[in-house]
Image (spheres, rainbow, N blue to C red):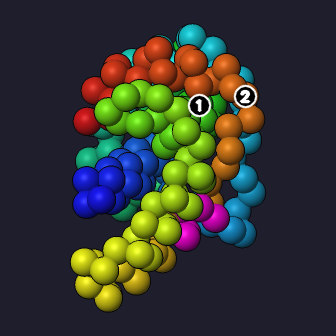
């Protein structure tokens, strides 16, 4: 049980970190934000996304030092995106969001896909029943799972699952 809970917590943290690196503002997607526009990913999208990660990681530190969303940072993000075959950073960000939707449903041990919302519902029930988790910690975990379920989306394009599964190891390594 604890292992499964740690995996869910790690997944939430990983997704949060990847979006922080790939977005130019600190505003997280919430219920008031429009849902992520899901697109059909191509092999090129995924390969170029992976190739862009080292450049984006280097820029992430500069973004933090510069206070985030500046014209200079926006220009650098667009330049990185164009260098890696995207029309602009918006397209790269859209691809990143679609990859993240699929990654959220991949079992880290088996690589098999399950709907992330179903996994979170199951984990929520397990957390609620687990008497070994202290009250405040349990309350925090439950709140995080509920928020994650409310902001998560089901995969609209099933072929994205196969494509992301094919590149899962490279994506994981790129996001380390």
User: Is residue 100 at all visible to an observer of this figure?
Assistant: no
Residue 51 lies, with reference to residue 107, above or below; the image says above
| Residue that numbered label 1 is attached to | 95
| Residue that numbered label 2 is attached to | 157
**Quick one: label 1, few (<14), some, or many (20+) residues within 10 Å?**
many
Asked whether, in this view, residue 51 is left or right of residue 152, the answer is left
At horizontal 68% and vertical 44% (from top left) the residue drawn is 154
Residue 102 lies, with reference to residue 152, above or below; the image says above
Main secondary structure of the magenta stretch:
helix
Q: Quadrant of the N terminus?
A: bottom left
Residue lying at the far top in this picture: please name it.
43
Residue 162 lies, with reference to residue 92, above or below; the image says above
Q: State the SS at label 1.
A: helix
Estimate the x, y position of residue 108 in percent, counting from the top left: 35, 36
Tag 1 or tag 2, which sits nearer the N-term? 1
Q: Nearer the viewer, residue 77 or 169?
A: 169
Estimate the x, y position of residue 8 in percent, counting from the top left: 38, 54
Image-quadrant location for residue 85: top right
Q: Is residue 164 magenta?
A: no
User: Is residue 157 at all visible to an observer of this figure?
Assistant: yes
At horizontal 26% and vertical 47% (from top left) the residue drawn is 61
Q: State the SS at label 2.
A: loop
Closer to viewer: mark 2 or mark 1:
2
At horizontal 25% and vertical 60% (from top left) the residue drawn is 2
Q: Nearer the viewer, residue 157 or 112?
A: 112
Residue stretch in magenta: 146-150
Estimate the x, y position of residue 89 in percent, counting from the top left: 56, 34
């Amino acid at each position: 049980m604890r292992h499964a809970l740690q995996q869910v917590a790690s997944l939430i943290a990983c997704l949060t970190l990847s979006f922080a690196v790939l977005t130019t503002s600190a505003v997280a997607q919430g219920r008031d934000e429009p849902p992520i526009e899901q697109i059909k990913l191509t092999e090129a999208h995924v390969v170029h996304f992976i190739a862009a990660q080292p450049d984006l990681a280097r820029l992430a530190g500069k973004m933090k030092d510069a206070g985030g969303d500046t014209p200079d940072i926006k220009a650098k993000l667009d330049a990185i995106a164009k260098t890696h075959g995207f029309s602009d950073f918006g397209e790269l960000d859209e691809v990143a969001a679609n990859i993240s939707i699929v990654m959220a449903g991949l079992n880290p041990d088996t690589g098999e896909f399950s709907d992330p919302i179903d996994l979170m519902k199951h984990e929520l029930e397990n957390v609620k029943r687990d008497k070994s988790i202290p009250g405040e910690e349990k309350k925090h975990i439950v709140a995080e799972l509920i928020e994650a379920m409310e902001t998560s989306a089901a995969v609209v394009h099933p072929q994205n699952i196969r494509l992301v599964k094919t590149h899962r190891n490279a994506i994981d390594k790129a996001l380390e």
